[in-house]
Image (spheres, coloured by chain):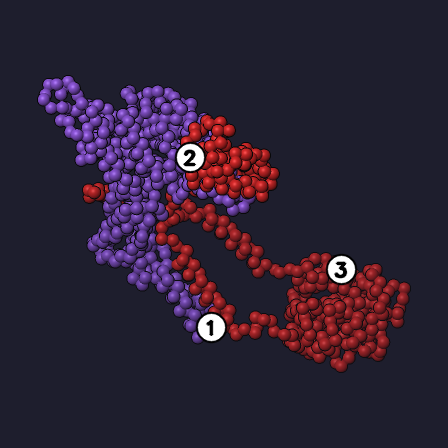
Chain colours: A red, B purple
Amino acid sequence: MSTPVVTVHEAVVGDGTSTRSRSARRWRRARWWLGLLALVVVAALLSALPEPQTSTLTLAPDNPGDLGARAAAQILEREGVDVRYVRHIADVEALAGPGATVLVVGDYLLVDEQVDALDDTGADLVLVDAGWALGMLSPSLASSGDSSAELEVRSAECEDPDAVVAGAITASGSMLATGPGAIVCFPAPGTTTDRGGAYAVAESDGRRIVALADTAPLTNEHLDEQGNAALVLRALGRHERLVWYIPSLDDVGAGGESEPAPGQLLPPVVPILALQLLLVVVVAALWRGRRLGRLVTEKLPVVVRAGETTRGRGRLYRRGRSYGHAAASLRAGTAARSAGRLGLPRSAAAPLVIDAIARAAGRRPADVEALLYGPPPTDDRGLAQLARDLDHLESEVHRT
Amino acid sequence: MALTWRAVVLAALGLPVVLVVPAAGTVLLWTLLVVVACVADVALAASPRQVAIRREVPASVRLTDPATSTLTLTNQGGRRLRALVRDAWPPSTGAQTDRHRVDVRPGDGIRVRTVLVPARRGDAQADRVTIRTLGPLQLAGRQASLTVPGRLRVLPEFASRRHLPSRLARLRELDGRASVQVRGPGTEFDSLREYVIGDDVRAIDWRATARRSDVVVRTWRPERDRRVLIVLDTGRTSAVRVLDAPRIDASIEAALLLAALATKAGDRVELLVFDRRVRGRVAGATGAGVMAPFADTLALAEPELVETDWPGIVAQIRQRLSQRALVVLLTALDPSAVEQGLLGVAGQLTERHQVVLASVSDPEVDALRTARTGAAAVFDAAAAERVGLERAAVSVRLRQRGAEVVDALPDDLAPRLADTYIALKAAGRL
């Protein structure tokens, strides 16, 4: 063979791009995605801005709705009261002490230990809608259990200075004085304070316990009606610090006896280590992710095999249960090959073929005829048997 | 921009540091360190676009023979070029190792060789050359894929050339040039010579004998300078896979063997590659110059998924051939396709030319025919039997129209076709 002709191509330097054109192209290609990304980031930032946080929790100091109490909280803050909004008794314990006011909103979620913890703080208490806790905290006051939901204008009818200043409030419900040193105000219209009132004050162990039977005077909706604001602000603004406590479901037990979360069981280095591992993973991904040049593709030749059409035809025979067709094909094949071997022309008549094969195979012509031209089989076994018999016959013809 | 495993190791080295100083700031500092080191490395890496690349590749290579694609890289930049170079070729070219590590000083050059062992016929176009240069720390680098043109034509394997010597020997026997005496082959008058015992008495030329005192016999030789037109059908039936290669590959082997044989026998061989239009042709080449254009044209013959236009082929043949010739149709003996296409025009061809139809048969069908394992196999066997009968019937109809039919397994087709050619030549039917 002669030496191969070698084609030498012109030397190529670079790909005709410059740093400028490449960066321009990258910018053109990426700008839409970058714009989208910027949009998402801006939206996320906007939503995460330290915008005055609000909630929809009833009587929460950050709820601006009708049932919230942001108005009262904001007025108190403006007047120089340090309002601390807490949901856990542990926080109350940490923040409250003598010389502070603790506002407790509702007692449905309180348990004995928490009420005891409240008692132990030594702070003044304002209990709103907390009849059961009131009974435990103050021996001289009790809820009457009368829960009339009708809001009505009630006048003070007592000597408590706060109540007298307020004059009248809109409220419902009632509490009873069961011992000495307790003052009950704002009875239902037409009754006296002996029958219970919406507001009660009791002094015990040097601290003052104020109870409101109804949450209405505190809400944004009703704060500006009658003397509600005066009563509430005077009750809550007595001290420099107000701990606004709304019990929550996940506040389990008092004094931090809860089990530590799984994350707290790990050594503190673990999250930092995970962060560093994340860096390693990112770098490894960048290392493996960059391909050394693109994949090279090429056309593949047809993968369908020539025998597929034959197989397909076989399946069709089988699905159609065409034993007759199949048997006829097998017989015709055997007859044609045998006849060819015996030197008969393809156009030879059937009796001639039968005769020749019978003589060559040493069989009776009737048997050969039954095999080659008999009735078609009617099931799988019959067809398989026929195929075997034809094979036998053909091999016998071959031998002669 | 591309990173190496060293960058990962650098990032991982921060783990013990974090264990010693467990703070988020440590992670941040280490990330900054990794980023700065990588960016500096990229900035200090040589530019992959300041490398002159020259490619040398053989124009053509025979299938399964190795070829070498040589890249000459010259560092035209001012920095030391530490790089990984990939010379990408399509998968079927069988590039053994197409990645090369190079280290070139400024102004120097280096050669990298990629050995290709092609596994598929046709033109293989080189893909891009990718250069990934690394900075001094080898943490990161720059990467560019450059288009460096290159084409390698993979010629048909011509494995059937092993049959050529034996066929040529038989041809020489016909020619009377061999030492073995054979009886009167050929029809063309060659020369007169003295009678030796054993010659056919019917070959005695009585007139010449009368002129001389000796008994003189005529010798004959096979016709020469006959025309042979090989028509390769690249229609849909040629695309089908038989054994492990498309049917057309076996046809190409047969065409090459026949061309080599006929050229040696002194005939003029032409080639027509056709499906619905002319895909390639070789005409006018003679002697030793035939095989190269044949291999070149056949290398590019690819099956097209269209139905072959047989009247078009007949028109082409009529246009090319004015005198009687041997027309070899390399196609598939597919009963339905032949009935709808070739049978209608076979008569027009055979009345003017000697026609041979060569077809690749499928060994899988034979295997199916003899399978007896289970009912499904017997049905398949019946289908195979039916296919065989239909092929036989179509062959008979073609023979009735005067065409020769060669139906053989892929490996046997080339020698069988050559034998048919020799037999036709011996019988003086060209």
Q: Amino acid at mark 2?
A: Arg
Q: Quadrant of residue B400?
A: top left
Q: Residue at x 16, y 24 (%)?
A: B217
Left of B343 or right of it: where is B69?
left
Q: Secondary structure at mark 2?
A: helix
Residue sitting at the far bottom: A205
Q: Residue at x 85, y 76 (%)?
A: A178
Left of B4 or right of it: where is B165?
left
Q: Which residue is mark 2?
A: A341
Residue A196, placed above or below residue B155: below
CA distance separating discs 3 and 2? 115 Å
Q: Which residue is mark 1?
A: B22
Both marks 3 and 2 on one chain: yes
Chain letter for mark 3: A
Q: Residues within 10 Å of mark 3 (few under 14, many from 20)?
A: many
Q: Amino acid at mark 3?
A: His
Q: Residues within 10 Å of mark 1 (few under 14, many from 20)?
A: some
CA distance separating discs 3 and 1? 53 Å
**Can you say which quadrant of the picture contains the N terminus of chain B?**
bottom left
Which circle, 3 or 1, is nearer the viewer? 1
Residue B191, placed above or below residue A250: above
